Image (tube, coloured by chain):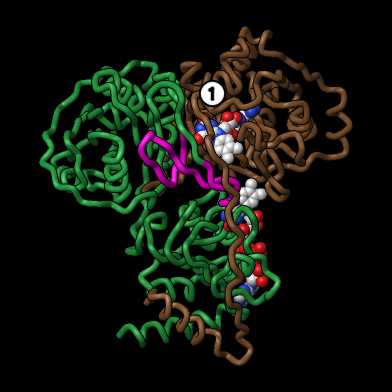
Amino acid sequence: MSNVLVLVDHTGGTVRKTTAELLTIARRLGEPVAVYIGEGVQDALPALGQYGATKVIALTDPELTQYLVAPKAEALQQVAAKLEPAAILISSSAEGKEIAARLAVKLDSGLITDAVDVQEGPVTTQSVFAGNYTVQAKVTHGTPIITVKPNAATPEAAETSPEVEEFDVTISDAAKTARITDSKPREATGRPELTEAAIIVSGGRGTGGDFGPVEAFADSLGAAVGASRAAVDSGWYPHAYQVGQTGKTVSPQLYVAAGISGAIQHRAGMQTSKTIVAINKDEEAPIFELVDFGVVGDLHKVLPTATEEVTKRKS
Amino acid sequence: MKIVVCAKFVPDATADRRFRSEDNTVDRAGVDGLLSELDEYAVETALTVKENGDAEVTVLTVGPEQAADAVKKGLQMGADAGVHVIDDAIHGSDAVATSLILAKALGKLEADLVVFGMGSTDGGMGVVPAMVAERLGLPAVTLGSEVTVDGSTVKIRRDGDTASDTVEGTLPLVLSVSDQANEPRYPSFKGIMAAKKKPVETWSLADLELSGEQVGQAGAWTEVTEVTARPARTAGTIVADEDGSGAAQLVEFLSTNKFL
Ligand SMILES: Cc1cc2nc3c(=O)[nH]c(=O)nc-3n(C[C@H](O)[C@H](O)[C@H](O)COP(=O)(O)OP(=O)(O)OC[C@H]3O[C@@H](n4cnc5c(N)ncnc54)[C@H](O)[C@@H]3O)c2cc1C
Ligand SMILES: Cc1cc2nc3c(=O)[nH]c(=O)nc-3n(C[C@H](O)[C@H](O)[C@H](O)COP(=O)(O)OP(=O)(O)OC[C@H]3O[C@@H](n4cnc5c(N)ncnc54)[C@H](O)[C@@H]3O)c2cc1C
């Protein structure tokens, strides 16, 4: 069977759930080979083996992580030249897409981004135009390069004990021309990650700047917190939590929109959620066109009462 | 300094966007279009750099006849000149092909700084800036939410999921900016009048020494095989909280659907 490369998404050896999803998808297309860039490959090994990586290619040159994405794309090109994979799968993060973009040009290959499903072929499914259309696509030239959105597959375990193979890369001077000069880590909130969460509670301009009720309700449900751009632009919540066209696209089991009108750009990021609930004091708000359940009312009254009730039922 | 802003003409997101049934490409002729709103942030960035130093700003678009409107909007905002690459063979280009056309045009324009938006509002892949940088052999600093250009050094702040980074590169360079970068200006009446006198060149593929086989559907390395409109959602239950029972009904709904 032919190799399918999966670029491992990790922070210092802790593998993200999206990688388990990619490995699961890769098994439909061939033999999953994990490509690990950076330090900590030994820490990552159990997780990569659990989801069926048959081999782990480790790239440890420190220059790979100092200079943004260009060296990483070069490295992947060199791995691809050696392994001649049937496809290359990368997470649909900002960095993942940028690596994929450079790689597509280097390999003279087609690129499909933001796949929500990938089946044998590979044939991809994308959700486009604010979720109003679903399209099937395929790469017709070169090595199919596909970036895959979080939650595109349910991780299925398939235990292997992969060997680690060190791989030496040559990085050109041209790839070292843009660099990170400073990095401030984001504080952890203790809540689930937005793009991976099963439940999300989002607040909009209707919160009036007080995200307390939104956070409390989210915590009672074990949910992640999101925000509309209006809330972010007002400085009420950090940009990393924005849901929508220029924020995160999410597709949780349950999405709760509180004090959010439902503008097309917001809908673009949450329309494919399985179940949608809204609390809005304006019964004409466009968000109500999407909901499975809606409450016309003041979120400052509804959310605290609902939080109490959920907590009571759960205890 | 020569700054080129790449600006895309896209179907209006608030209108009825659709695909052509004959070839599964986006219908760009039968629907209203406009300069992709996210490219307004790129134009604004270029104009700000110009105001803080000495620069000439050119707006570059690749697209059908109506795409001239994207160039026009850029000129009305304050750009100095426009280039519109137009050729029937371009229809159906994918991202790889589009980046080839843009890279050829940028080479001809000899840009020092190329500014992109974070993503188009139709394809929304967010990959064209990196593809163009790769083709031109240039560094790319992307998704800037704060941009400073000091001499030949370009510095951006980028807010990622796990960290807020400062990223630096030197000209010539490819830059892309997010919608957090600035507040795009509205064209003034003076700007609208002045735009009419500004030079706009139209280039064909031949002007870029490209053939029809390298672009369009012939040169696209991806193919859309099937398009399905999403079925309309069935109407949900909506309750009023007038009597204060909204929260209880909401929790009951969540419980019935096993979210608790
Ligand atoms: C290029 C572009 C990209 C964009 N990208 C995004 C994006 O990624 N994400 C995004 O969200 N937006 C995005 N937007 C902005 C979008 O168009 C809307 O402006 C934004 O989503 C509105 O946010 P909102 O719903 O919180 O605010 P509003 O539209 O002001 O709605 C607030 C709602 O709260 C309700 N409300 C007020 N008080 C209460 C209360 N006490 N209790 C209950 N309800 C109450 C009101 O009835 C109203 O419906 C983008 C816009 C553009 C042009
Ligand atoms: C719904 C949809 C899905 C698609 N999926 C794919 C896919 O998976 N793979 C694929 O290869 N193609 C795909 N395409 C085609 C692709 O969108 C076009 O080829 C497009 O020209 C380049 O990609 P983009 O619009 O996503 O641009 P992005 O990469 O999102 O654009 C980033 C920036 O590049 C600049 N730019 C982009 N296009 C132009 C232009 N024509 N003129 C000037 N500047 C420009 C702008 O500054 C823009 O802000 C898709 C198109 C649509 C409508």
Residue at horizontal 37 percent and vertical 22 percent from the top? A176
**Residues in magenta, as a range:** A111-135
Can residue B68 be seen here? yes
Q: Quadrant of residue B238?
A: bottom right
Name the residue nearer the viewer: A160 or A258.
A160
Quarter that holds the C terminus of chain B: bottom left
Q: Is residue A70 left or right of residue B59?
A: left
Residue receiving disc 1: B220
Q: Which residue is most to the front?
A: B22
Check the image and report above or below for B237 versus A16: below
Give percent across and percent down for residue A45: 15, 43
Looking at the picture, tell me which residue is in the foreground, A115 or A261. Answer: A115
Query: Mark 1 CB in 8 Å range of ligand 2?
Result: yes
> For this rendering, which residue is in front, A147 or B16?
B16
Chain B: drawing colour? brown
Q: Which residue is found at the position 13% from the left and 43% from the top? A: A160
Q: Is residue B222 above or below residue A172?
A: below
Q: In which quarter of the image is residue A285?
A: bottom right
In the figure, B117 relative to A273: above or below?
Answer: above
Chain letter tied to green: A
- Ligand 1, seen in the image, is in the quarter at bottom right
Q: Where is residue B94 in the image (x, y as percent from the top left)?
A: 55, 27
Image position, residue B96 (x, y; %):
51, 24
